[in-house]
Amino acid sequence: MSTEVEIHTKNLDLTDRLREYVEKKVPKLTRYIQGIDSTRVDLTHAKSARNAQDRYVAQITVRGSRFILRAEERADDIMTALDAALANMQRRIARFKGRRYRGRGDRTPVSQAFAPEVQEEEPTEPVIVRRKRFLLTPMSEEEAIEQMELLGHNFFVFFNASTGQVNVLYRRHDGTYGLIEPEIG
């Protein structure tokens, strides 16, 4: 099954050679995971990057019916950045497939446990524009870190099984993680 690849560039000319390279390499991701609906490749040249090794950015986003996986890499050459992003995406897919069917305490698959239930209401006041509801499954801090990494987000809301509270896990600029534990005052 061949999936179409959307290629978007910013501050970079999309040459025929680069387009052919992307269209040759990226569809091979279907070998590693089934059910890919769309694939988007963002290629960027950051002229103002402090480090010359980080000037070219390749980001790959793979969407399926029950998953979204993202990989981003930087390098001094766009082809190198794209190859590194593809390798990163292969690792993310392998990690996702390993965790996908691992059940929780109630034997619910991870894909069902974290499926957000989106409920939009007509706004009565202009303050709250959108409400989202999602199922919180008890998990450890390590599991929350893994889920956040799989989603590629900078923060993750979860129900901490050890404390019995809702916590927010976030990634700090230095690569470490922070945990927000609410207290009622």
Image (cartoon, rainbow, N blue to C red):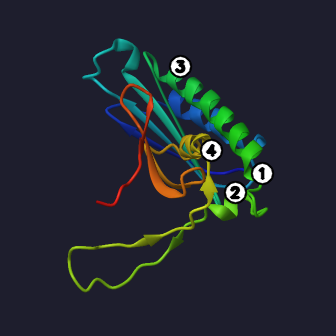
Quarter where residue 175 is shown: top left
Relative vertical location of residue 55 with respect to residue 35 in this rendering, above or below: above
Mark 1–mark 3 CB contact (< 8 Å): no
Q: Is residue 174 visible?
A: yes
Question: How far is disc 3 from disc 4 in space, using C-alphas?
Answer: 31 Å
| Along the line of sight, the residue nearer the viewer: 121 or 80 | 121
Q: Which residue, given by chain and number where applicable, does mark 3 sit on?
A: 80
Q: Which residue, given by chain and number where applicable, does mark 4 sit on?
A: 143
Question: How far is disc 3 from disc 2 in space, using C-alphas?
Answer: 33 Å
Q: Which residue, given by chain and number where applicable, does mark 2 sit on?
A: 110
> For this view, does 107 lie left or right of residue 19?
right
Q: Residues within 10 Å of mark 4 (few under 14, many from 20)?
A: some
Question: How far is disc 4 from disc 1 in space, using C-alphas?
Answer: 12 Å
Mark 4 lies on a secondary structure that is helix
Question: How far is disc 1 from disc 3 in space, using C-alphas?
Answer: 34 Å
For marks 2 and 4, give the one nearer the viewer.
4
